[in-house]
Amino acid sequence: MGKFYITTPIYYVNSTPHLGHAYTGVISDIIARYHVSLAEKTFFLTGTDEHGAKNVRAAEAAGKEVSEFVKKKREVFINLAKALNLSNSDFIFTSDQKRHWPGAQKLWNELSENGDIYKGLYKGLYCIGHEAFVTEKDLIDGKCSDHNEVPEYIEEENYFFRLSKYNAEIKKKIESGELSILPGTRKNEILSLLEEGLRDVSFSRPSRDISWGIPVPGDAMQTMYVWCDALTNYITALGYGSEDESKFTEFWPADLHVMGKEILRFHAAIWPAMLISANLPLPKTILVHGLIQSGGRKMSKTLGNVVDPFRIIEKYGAESLRYYLSREIPLFSDGDFTEEKFIEAYDGNLSNGIGNYARRVSTMIKNYFSSELSRPDDGVLASVPMHKKTTFFNSEDRSPSIELEYFSVSYFIEHSILPKYHTHMKEYDINSAANLVFALLGELDGYVQANEPFKLIKTDPEKTKAVLWNLAYGLATIARMLLPFMPNTSAKIFDMLSIGAAESSWKKFVVKDIPPLFPRLETAKNSAEK
Ligand code: MSP
């Protein structure tokens, strides 16, 4: 049995979570659930990034003690994970002195013993929003363009990490795909950064300025730089640096780090360099998603367009939000969220799409066959094929292998839909995998129109039974494909057909009455307005 280790970034707790935070979590959860469904031993980590100037400043603004403040905010992030139905195996937070600090300090010592930490004088600009040093070229009118703030000028002694030493090696590993960065455009972006050359980075701040953080081992006058501290969460959560490193041995290296594009360089340059220095294996893949905007603009308090995920979940349910984020938002470019678009997608694809199909199929089975369908003989099934010129691909090398005009619904599912679905899911292309659910739905709708079971029942009940069997089998397949995306909807469909997720249990469908999967929102809204 294989293993799969997947992580989200750990979230800053300086403000309450918005839809962007929910997005990273949902995408990661879908991938994690898919790997669970492959029977891989899966570890899915998320958590909070609680040190650094950003959190301290937010606590001060709220008039709270920092540790109290971050604890309260952490609870909100934990609640968000629950509300989104994330299946995370663990939740790490960096102010955890027992679980996180020893490993972070151990890694620091490794770098130091390897001669990669040295003391130097730092002169330059620090942007608290980024929690990073910035240069003049990152500024517009003297302000950081992402955070619209004037950075602090800092001149101080701190420790540096010899990042430049690893430039060539990291570049080689990224080029060769040993450290894979998806999509290719992001890989190229990081390669050109490496082409320019990495400079050593400041890895600590004097504790008189920043005391909220992890003390540098052997020098309590210095606090670890928040990114150096935060990146180690991916291994401290597995017990690195603790008495029991068995999880670390079992799960490291990570199979996948998921993140938004703005933090790629920390993960594709600093983190691999730290790991190489400590002689630890590198993560296998970094998946970089785009950012979610709202109404075409970056979400910001000033614009008043920040989308609160809790409000959306409360109003429309976590399942439909998971649907919207995974299918309607392009994974690799920036996407847009507005409530109008959300409602439109929900009504069009969930209510009229999957919901309506499930209702039609179950009603016919109920009315024509007293709610029960056993698998018809192969001969009868063969009499109601799909009719459509289709090229089936060789599932091994994906070369076109055979063109057919008539084939059974189950052949189409097994040899066209599912192989493509698994390929997409394994490549983390969740948009395309979700699109296939709707492609199958479209084919099944076409099959209803071609066979008209509501007319056929009057002349040929046997054939009608086979048609409906195929339609129910298609519905069960949709539920199986939706499992990582909308686990509760899947469970409802399996329940409606009285089957389990495993195909071996699909010998007979007994249809139960269940409430509509996705009541129409437009109608709900209209009737509420009346
Ligand atoms: N604390 C760092 C990560 C440290 S990981 C060792 C951080 N935190 S964050 O809270 O600012 O961002 C966490 C994640 O949320 C990132 O993947 C980020 O890209 C994502 N998002 C934050 N705003 C977003 C959008 N508007 N849209 C999509 N995702 C965004 O960075």
Image: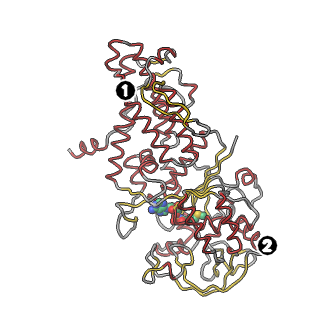
Of residue 395 and residue 259, the one placed in the foreground of this image is 395
Amino acid type assigned to the residue bearing label 2 in the image? Glu
Q: Residue at x 69, y 68 (%)?
A: 273
Amino acid type assigned to the residue bearing label 1 in the image? Val
Label 1: state its secondary structure. Answer: helix
Tell me the residue that label 1 is attached to.
448
- Is residue 72 visible in the rendered image? The answer is no
Of residue 480 and residue 411, the one placed in the foreground of this image is 411
In the picture, measured across the screen, residue 449 lies left or right of residue 186, that is: left
Q: Residue at x 66, y 66 (%)?
A: 171
* Mark 2 lies within 8 Å of ligand 1 (Cβ measured): no
Rendered location of residue 246, percent (x, y): 75, 52
Rendered location of residue 500, percent (x, y): 54, 29
Tell me the residue that label 2 is attached to.
113
Rendered location of residue 241, percent (x, y): 74, 62
Task: Tell me which colouring the rendered structure shows.
Answer: secondary structure
Q: Looking at the image, is mark 1 or mark 2 nearer the viewer?
A: 1
* Mark 1 lies within 8 Å of ligand 1 (Cβ measured): no
Task: Point out the tag, 1 or 2, that comes first from the N-terminus.
Answer: 2
In the picture, measured across the screen, residue 418 lies left or right of residue 160, that is: left
Dot 1 alpha-carbon crowd within 10 angstroms: few under 14, some 14 to 19, many 20 or more: some
Dot 2 alpha-carbon crowd within 10 angstroms: few under 14, some 14 to 19, many 20 or more: few
Please give the count of numbered marks on the rendered protein: 2
* Image quadrant containing the N terminus: top right
Label 2: state its secondary structure. Answer: helix
Of residue 269 and residue 106, the one placed in the foreground of this image is 269
Rendered location of residue 386, percent (x, y): 43, 25
Q: Name the outermost residue toward the left.
A: 530
